Each structure stands twice: as structure tokens, then as C-alpha cells.
Image: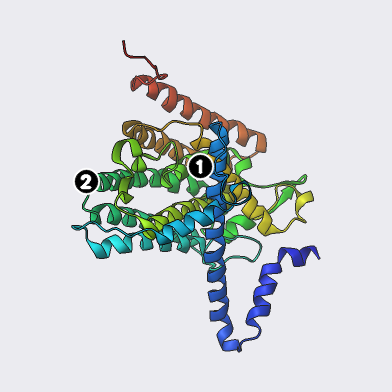
Amino acid sequence: MIEKADQIFVLLLHWLVGFLPEAWQHVASVVVCVAVIVAVYPALFAVAVLMERKGLGRMQNRYGPNRVGPFGVLQPVADGIKSLTKEDIVPRNADAAVHFIAPLVLVVAVFMGLAVLPMGRNMVLVEMDASLLFFFAMGASTELSVFMAGWSSRNKYSLLGAMRAVAQMISYEVPLLLSTVGVVMITGSLSLVDIVDAQTRYSWGLAHWNVFKPWGLAGFVMFVIASMAETNRSPFDLPEGESEIIAGYFTEYSGFKFALFFLGEYVGMFSIAGLGTTLFLGGWSSPLAALSWIPSWIWFFAKVELWICFFIWVRGTLPRLRQDQLMNFAWKFLLPMTLVNLLVAAEWRFVEGVWLRWIVGMAIVAGAYVLMGRVGMRRERLGPRSYRYAE
């Protein structure tokens, strides 16, 4: 019974395509899986938006949406209807074709990345040997869509927002990639399925998740920071700095095109959270052997939702960075720390003795943090913010 609950969607898929001729079953299976992904993640997007608006409202001592439906639960439906019915305005001098294609490229790219994520045991749409590279290749194409949106609008604010977004995404994509190299070094594979399988072992009832190792913990922290910058989440939401450049690269978008950008940003959050879950948090595996009876797909989506809650929490807590602080942090601190973490991963692989591995690994990480963090901040003359009122 537990096995059936775990594989319920796989069994349901096999039952559905079983009615078709054998020659059509593979194609039908792919079509059904794609349809499920395209349906499930927009539904999670609606739930996440409601969670964020409610959560931020509570953090700011207000109710949040509470008019449409019981406790405001139908607010995403109202927002969707409004987006579909609003007028689509295109600037007179804009490149209409590129202006139309840009949000489609963004949405397609983020959904393509979901195709290689193992969302449960035997639940992955496309299993390939280099699925991690495929995910990052799809993620890199979102930068093209952002620049297309800003350039095609023929608006200086849009172009400025696009340039800032591309500079930020390229800068933080480097440490994001390097933070995952330690996982590849230890696992010996670029396949996300193999990476999850390597974390499903248990010792004394505790899972062998990568985050429970010094190189994995350091890589996880840096991955989380870089992922927030890649998805333009606070405090790295400078491309959409409303107080400076109106709304960034999608200033000239309205109606359903704006909704597509909104959808792409949130599905991108789900995608990067799913990748982080796969690389560092055991994917669909349970943290304790005693909890392995819970279906694997529940574990995966529960971890992803926790990531989203963390993103919401950070947005309601931290102020926005300045552009110089954002770029300095990426190139002068985060990038060197990811390179140091590769040394820690190598040390974990070749040093004998668990306790010696931990001591040496944590000493390297702590020493690099103090050297680049404290000394670097002192050199840059950075310190606590001071707030003064005008005389």
C-alpha cells in the first residue's frame, strides 16, 4: 500500500497510456507528463502568490488579501481574470515582434528546466546523463529574454533595467554554477537522478544529504544566496527597483504579457528551489529512515515550499542592496568562497577519518570567511548603516 501511494502517479500514467497502441504510448506518455507539469506549477504559482501577499501582510501588521473568497483565497483567480482582460498596450516605437516573443522565451525556458528535475521516485520527465548542464543551459537563456524585453520596449528605463538584470544574472550565475561543482565532484555524475540516489543512504537512521557535510553546507548557503540573485528576489531585486527605474525591464508590458513575466519569475523560483533540493537536501528522499513511508513526491514538494517560504521571509526582512554592493559581493566574496569550497570538497574526498575531514573542512571555510569577509569589508570601508535626519 505504501509503495502504491509512492508510485500512484507513475501507475496512473501507465494505466492511461495503456489504452493506446504500443507505438503511440511513448509519445502519449511525454504529452501527459508535459501537460501535468504545465498545469501543476501555475497552480503552485497562484498558491505562492497568495502565501506571499498574506505573509508579507502579517509581517507588516496588515491582513493582506481578504475580500475575494473566504479569507481572500480566490484573489489569485481575480488577478488572473484581470490580467486576461486588461488591454495589451505596445509602445509605438517598440519592436513588436521581439516585444511579443520575450515573455514567451522566459516561460518556455523555465518550464524546460523542470523537465530534468526528479520530483519523486521514478518521477522525472527526461532522464539524461548531463541533466545538470541542461538545467543551467535553460536557465542561462532567461537572460536573453530579459534583454529582449528591455531592448524591444524602446524605453530608457526598460533598457536600464534589462542591463542591470543581465549584469546581475551573469555575475551570480558564476558562483551558482561553482557552488554545485562540489556535489558533482563527490557524486561523480552530472545526472540529477544519480545525485539524488547518492543521498538516499542512511546511517543510524539519518540520511546522507550533502548539506550535512562541511562542503555541502557551505555550498548550500552560497547556492541559496546566488539563487535569490538569479531569480531577482529581495534583497537582490534591483532589476525591478520601483523607486529607481519604475518596474525594470517589463515597464512597457501590460495585460497577459506582464502576467507571463510574473509567472516565469515564480516558476523560476520553483525551478531553482527544486534544483537546490535535489543537490543538497536529498531530493525526494526523507531526512530520517523512520519517515521513508511518506510518499517521495510529498517530500520533494514540501521542501520546495519551504524554500519559497524562506524567500518570502527574506523579502519581508532585508532591505534592498545598492548596485555597487551587489556586484562587489558577487565578485569579491561569493565567487572566491565557491572556489575555496571546491578545495574543501577535494579535502573531504581524499583525507582519511570523518572527524579529521570535518575539522579541516570547517577550518578552511571559516578561515576563508574571516579573511575575505572581515578583512575585505575593512578594506572597502564598509560598516553598519547610519541613519540621520535632515537638520
Q: Which of 346 and 241 is in front in this view?
A: 241
Could you tell me which residue is drawn at 32 percent across and 34 percent down?
A: 323
328 displayed left or right of 26? left
Quadrant of the frame with the C terminus: top left
Spot the residue most to the right.
Answer: 1
Q: Is residue 283 visible?
A: no
Q: How far apart are marks 1 and 2 (CA)?
A: 32 Å
Q: What residue type is labelled 1?
A: Val
Q: Disc number at residue 65?
A: none
Please state the horizontal and vertical placement of residue 261, each as a whole percent of the image. 40, 55
Please state the horizontal and vertical placement of residue 32, each as a whole percent of the image. 57, 74
Q: Is residue 72 visible?
A: yes
On the image, numbered disc 1 is attached to which residue? 224
State the SS at label 2: helix
Q: Which of 309 and 225 is in front in this view?
A: 309
Please state the horizontal and vertical placement of residue 365, each as a whole percent of the image. 51, 32
Q: Which of 376 and 4 is in front in this view?
A: 4
State the SS at label 1: helix
Q: Disc number at residue 156?
A: 2
Q: Nearer the viewer, residue 49 or 18?
A: 49
